[in-house]
Amino acid sequence: MSDCIFCAIVDGDIPGRIVHETEHTLAFLDANPLAPGHTLVVPKEHHARLDEVPADAAADLFAAVNDLVPRVESAVDADATNVGINDGPAAGQEVDHVHVHIVPRFEGDGGSPIHAVAGERPDLSDEELDDIEASISG
Ligand code: 5GP
Ligand code: ZN
């Protein structure tokens, strides 16, 4: 897409600190890192939402994440990692090109677990849980 910053990095039109590349996937350092080594992993083809990424590109994307997490941890001597996707604006997605965040974590870094991203916790009845289970499983 012409006005997409991540497409511009994929196309080499703007610089990126590229750390990994495959047929379908590119990984580069986040320009405003939450931690040293904060890496973004993107499908090369422009898709706004995760469910729009074709299966082969999605498999390549997550294989790259799997490969990169230990490499990033090792590069910055991290103790752990949060892996996350802001999938849609209501979830905090600002760049509308699918990207996986790899955020290295360090003992005592003052951050939070991924459980901190959502709003107030719902108090769901067994019936509501049954409905959700049935709806997702189809
Ligand atoms: P989102 O909020 O969409 O999940 O995250 C977008 C991420 O893209 C942010 O962490 C932001 O720092 C990063 N970002 C925005 N513009 C650029 C850019 O031009 N280059 C790189 N490398 N990262 C960017
Ligand atoms: Zn794009």
Image: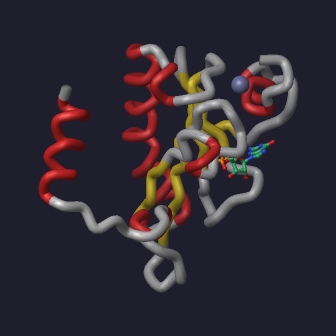
Pick the quarter of the image with the N terminus. Answer: top right
- Is residue 98 shown left or right of residue 55? right
- Is residue 33 shown left or right of residue 11? left
Residue 117 in the image: x percent, y percent? 49, 63
Which of 123 and 78 lies nearest the eye of the viewer? Answer: 123
- The residue positioned 60% from the left and 57% from the top of the image is 37
Position of 138 relative to 109 (above/below): above
Position of 29 relative to 43 (above/below): below
Which of 106 and 43 lies nearest the eye of the viewer? Answer: 43
- Tell me which corner region of the image, top left, top right, bottom left or bottom right, holds residue 115: bottom left
- Tell me which corner region of the image, top left, top right, bottom left or bottom right, holds residue 80: bottom left
- The residue positioned 37% from the left and 68% from the top of the image is 121
- The residue positioned 77% from the left and 38% from the top of the image is 16
Residue 94 in the image: x percent, y percent? 71, 45
- The residue positioned 45% from the left and 52% from the top of the image is 83
Residue 62 in the image: x percent, y percent? 40, 33
Count the numbered circles shown: 0
